[in-house]
Image: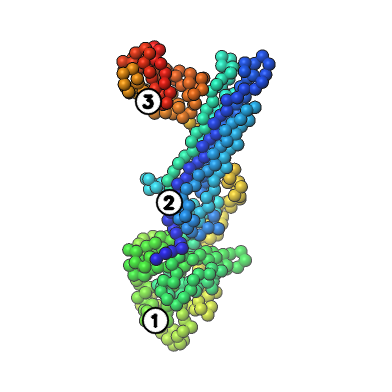
Amino acid sequence: MQLDFLDEANILVKGGKGGDGAISFRREKYVPKGGPDGGDGGNGGSVIIRATPNKTTLLEFKYKRKYFAEDGENGKAKNMYGKAGENLIIDVPLGTMIFNSETNDLLTDLKNPGDYYIAARGGKGGRGNSKFANSTLQAPRISENGADGEFNRLHLELKLVADIGIIGYPNVGKSTLISRISKAKPKIANYHFTTLTPNLGVVKVDEAKSFVVADIPGLIEGAHEGTGLGDQFLKHIERCYGILHLVDISGVEGRDPIEDYKKIREELEKYSTTLAEKDEIIAGNKIDIITEEELEKNIQNFERELDIEITPISAYSNKNLDAIIMKMWNMIKDYKEDELKNIEKIKRTYEDFKKLKVEPVVNEVYEYFNIEVTKISDHEYEIHSEGIDLLLKKYDISETDSRRKILNILERNGLSRTLGKAGVEEGDTIYIADYAFDYIP
């Protein structure tokens, strides 16, 4: 069975690499090599995941899984900075939870419009050679490489954000009801499991008041164990403040509204006690296809057996829909008014998010670290450690002053002493990454 609704997805996100700093010299009389004027590289862009009411599914992530932000540009001559990479904005529906795919840790829960999460930070741009000039190094041939952006594997999971969830057995009229009380246009037909995706609709109480309802499909006996797609959709009701439980009060299809109600309630309780404790309104649909005497008898039986009130309606012929709308509003109005007071309206535009300043990833270098020596052959040795890897990532060893800086840092961390203990002799070849040096104690 192919669904056009996707409520889980896995994506890969990567921040842009920072631009490399430039090595450049200007023309200036009496200044060695004209003086350094290499500019800094630009910061890489970050990947930002933003919640928006304009999205309702995670379907697009089925077809595109990789989201990489723009790299920063390299620095240029004349102290010109490289352009920063643009942030990459990924829009997701309200109610999207973001997990670390490797640890399953919940990273954030994007419930409200404008909520956002920095999914992968961009790398910091490297410094140009003008930043390394001093009284003893007036023409430095050294710059910094830009830092790599973060790379993360994320799991997205959507729990729809609706004020009220409409539940009930298949074919009791949930889709018809949501199409009548809102502008939602669900697929409607007279057979079970017509609805395979949750439908959202906005119900207007008046010009100033509205709320969101969700038609939750797939609930039948055994739903909490996955029967009828139920376990895929039960979790969406957890977001709702209240529940509208719809039953077919006519019973003309051989259904017993009392037994149907009991079975759905049992499924809610088995799935989650929190779910079962939510406020609930019961509506009896399809009152237009039985006589008034039959309707009165069915309602009396229902209320007497379950000791709860049921509101008779006909979604098809619009009977009593205003009454059920007001009942739903009265159930949630205090919650909605508090929500409006507490949620600050987000005024950031898409362009604001693209320019959002994010603390970049930096190329860190350890001040102290151990150096390991591996003998490759007679008179050939390789030195390595995590500290050395970080140095090579930050500085270009092919440049004279960069190489000198790297060797000075290694010497501070006991390079000569370590080589001596390993039996390295004068004239032996020492490899650092792809570069070879003759050892001179």
**What residue would you read off at disc 2?**
10
* Residue at 50 percent of width and 41 percent of height: 15
Which numbered circle lies on residue 333?
A: none
* Residue at 58 percent of width and 52 percent of height: 345
**What residue would you read off at disc 1?**
253
Q: What is the crowding at mark 3: few (fewer than 14 residues within 10 Å), some, or many (at least 20)?
A: some
* Depth order, front residue of 12/242: 12
Q: Amino acid at mark 2?
A: Asn
> Residues under labels 3 and 1: Cα distance?
77 Å
Q: Quadrant of the C terminus?
A: top left
Q: Position of residue 198 (x, y in %)?
A: 46, 65
Q: Position of residue 81 (x, y in %)?
A: 61, 32
Please indicate, yes or no, whether residue 351 appears anywhere in the rendered image: yes
Mark 2 or mark 1: which comes first in sequence?
2
**What residue would you read off at disc 3?**
384
Q: Is residue 314 left or right of residue 100?
A: right
Q: Position of residue 201 (x, y in %)?
A: 53, 66
* Residue at 54 percent of width and 73 percent of height: 180
> Residues under labels 3 and 2: Cα distance?
36 Å
- Between disc 3 and disc 2, the foreground one is 3
* Residue at 60 percent of width and 28 percent of height: 39
Mark 3 or mark 2: which comes first in sequence?
2
* Depth order, front residue of 15/275: 15
Q: Quadrant of residue 53?
A: bottom right
Mark 3 or mark 1: which comes first in sequence?
1
Q: Answer yes or no: do the residues labelled 3 and 1 have beta carbons within 8 Å?
A: no
Q: Amino acid at mark 1?
A: Glu
Asked if residue 158 is positioned above or below residue 33 in the image, the reply reads below
* Depth order, front residue of 340/369: 369
Q: Amino acid at mark 3?
A: His
